Amino acid sequence: MEMKNPDTKLGCRVVLFPQPFLGHLTPMLHLGYALCSKGFSVTIIQTRLNAPDPAQFPNFTFHYIEDALSKSESPPSDTWQILQSLNTSCVDPLRVALARLLEDASKSKEPIGCLITEPMWEFAGTVADEFNLPKMALRPGGLLALLVYDSLPLLREKGYFLIPGISSILYHSLSTYVYC
């Protein structure tokens, strides 16, 4: 993707916070390149788990945060357990990283415009609100996931969430089944 001349920067930085999984990281990197091509500076906050090599992405600034999984010798094999662990262990590191970035931005002429994250980071919106930082969500799922989410109101209306022996299926649990 063609990048603008560095002299034509907009003077605004966007912070991206992708999930550390290939199907999530790649769309966020593509968004980052699109934002760079329009003159935005891009910072990516990334866990150490599945972290990309920053040398391969010279247009981005990377800030790494620690997570419980990158320290463990054998991360859980269950995707849902990994996601729960990340959502528990990344709250404070994200808070610290955003505080540092906002402090650095206050000293420069490049304010942070917003945080772009994913809906699966359950805590990211709350942390952004603590700093009065505008936030957006990028849903990197495929067409099937979009169709499932679009169908949920109709499925709920028709009572398709009732499974014998299970009181109900939680709305946010469906994405686990879509990705499996």
Image (tube, rainbow, N blue to C red):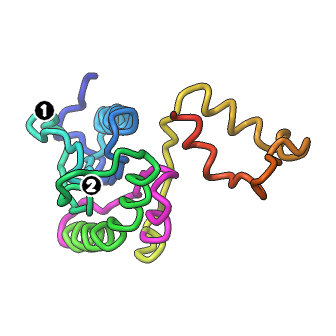
Identify the residue at image location x=36%, y=69%. Answer: 91
Q: Amino acid at mark 1?
A: Gln
The verdict on residue 58 being magenta is no
Q: Nearer the viewer, residue 133 or 64?
A: 64
Q: Position of residue 61 (x, y in %)?
A: 18, 49
Identify the residue at image location x=51%, y=34%. Answer: 180
Q: Can you tell which mark lies on residue 166?
A: none
Identify the residue at image location x=34%, y=40%. Answer: 21
Q: Amino acid at mark 2?
A: Ile
In the rendered structure, which segment of residues is drawn in magenta? 106-127
Q: Nearer the viewer, residue 61 or 25?
A: 25
Residue 92, image quadrant: bottom left
Q: Position of residue 115 (x, y in %)?
A: 40, 57
Q: Position of residue 158 (x, y in %)?
A: 91, 41
SS at mark 2? strand
Which numbered disc, 2 or 1, marks the residue that appears first in the sequence?
2
The verdict on residue 118 being magenta is yes
Residue that carries the numbered disc 1 in the rendered image: 56
